[in-house]
Amino acid sequence: MSYENIKVETQNAVAVVTVNRPDKLNALNDRTMDELDQAFAAIGADPAVQGVILTGAGEKAFVAGADIAELSTQSPVDGRERSLRGQRILDRIENLGKPVVAAVNGFALGGGCELAMACHVRVASENAKLGTPEVKLGIMCGYAGTQRLARLVGKGRALELLLTGDMADAQEAYRIGLVNKVVPRDQLLAESEALLRKMLANGPVSLRFTLDAVNRGLEMPFAEAQAHEATLFGLICTTEDMKEGTKAFLEKRPAKFQGK
Ligand code: COA
């Protein structure tokens, strides 16, 4: 598949998706969002891809937000549609069933911060800056940032960032739990891949079900989330991976998971 505003490169079961509009700091215009939607749909359906790294092109930005030129002319109806569509695309990423690591290589602002938060973990380079400056533009988060930020860092810290529009530098983002680790700029992709490959060494079904248990479970009352977890646990006991993983331990050898 060929794209104009993103790049997708797959190597050894890992797809690297790069938002590629560096002259606009990788701002998410409608076309870029469509391409991300198509790319993640294809990755989700491709058994040869087991995990994803999402990053931005150029030296300055992961993604500096939704495209303000497009936002500036939107009607209320356009705005609602754009918000719903963006939410759906980020939901697709969050519910991909395969781990997605955001390699945050610079500004991750507004829609860019929301995009990074839809990924399962975030590795930031030392120059990264994250925030939700929408209020400075007289708008607000529309890609579920109000919800994901509060769930990730807690309501008080989320509201501070959401209401001031301030950017957190990489260390502050790490301190409040907005990113999982901070690494030197020249090691960002290698560190992101190392973290992803550590996950991919485990059973693919285990990863898929764990993502499902966390994603869905956090939206349920605790008792229902426990019941959901128990159902998935029962289901995983039917898999070849479960037989192989437990057998390999008992035979003191590494497991060879098939994702079945
Ligand atoms: N939408 C559209 N274009 C954007 C953009 C966005 N969110 N963010 C940056 N750009 C464009 C700029 O307009 C500029 O384009 P130009 O060269 O054609 O004028 C180019 O990207 C470079 O940005 P610039 O502002 O010159 O870089 P900077 O290093 O001086 O500042 C930022 C970097 C991130 C602080 C600044 O670009 C910014 O504040 N961007 C908007 C962030 C934002 O509010 N995001 C939330 C949107 S909902």
Image (cartoon, rainbow, N blue to C red):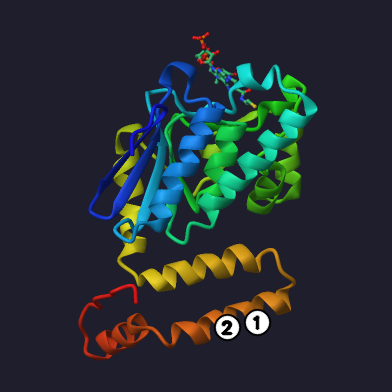
Q: Secondary structure at mark 2?
A: helix
Which amino acid lies under the numbered mark 2 shown in the image of this protein? Thr
Q: CA distance from mark 1 to mark 2?
A: 6 Å
Q: Is residue 83 left or right of residue 96?
A: right
Quadrant assignment, res 65: top right
Residues under numbered marks 1 and 2 in contact, where contact means CB atoms less than 8 Å apart: yes
Q: Position of residue 132 (x, y in %)?
A: 65, 32
Residue drawn at x 33%, y 62% as measured from the top left: 200
Q: Position of residue 7 (x, y in %)?
A: 35, 34
In the picture shown, does residue 233 fall above or below 152? Answer: below
Residue drawn at x 24%, y 76% as measured from the top left: 256
Which amino acid lies under the numbered mark 1 shown in the image of this protein? Ala
Q: Is residue 225 left or right of residue 258?
A: right
Q: Is residue 160 left or right of residue 178?
A: right
Quarter occupied by the N terminus: top left
Residue designated by label 1: 227
Answer yes or no: is residue 22 visible: yes
Taking depth in this image into account, of 36 and 141 the one nearest to the observer is 36
Q: Which mark is residue 63?
A: none
Residue designated by label 2: 231
Count residues near mark 1 (Cα–Cα under 10 Å), then give few for <14, some for 14-19, many for 20+: few
Answer yes or no: is residue 142 visible: no
Quarter occupied by the C terminus: bottom left
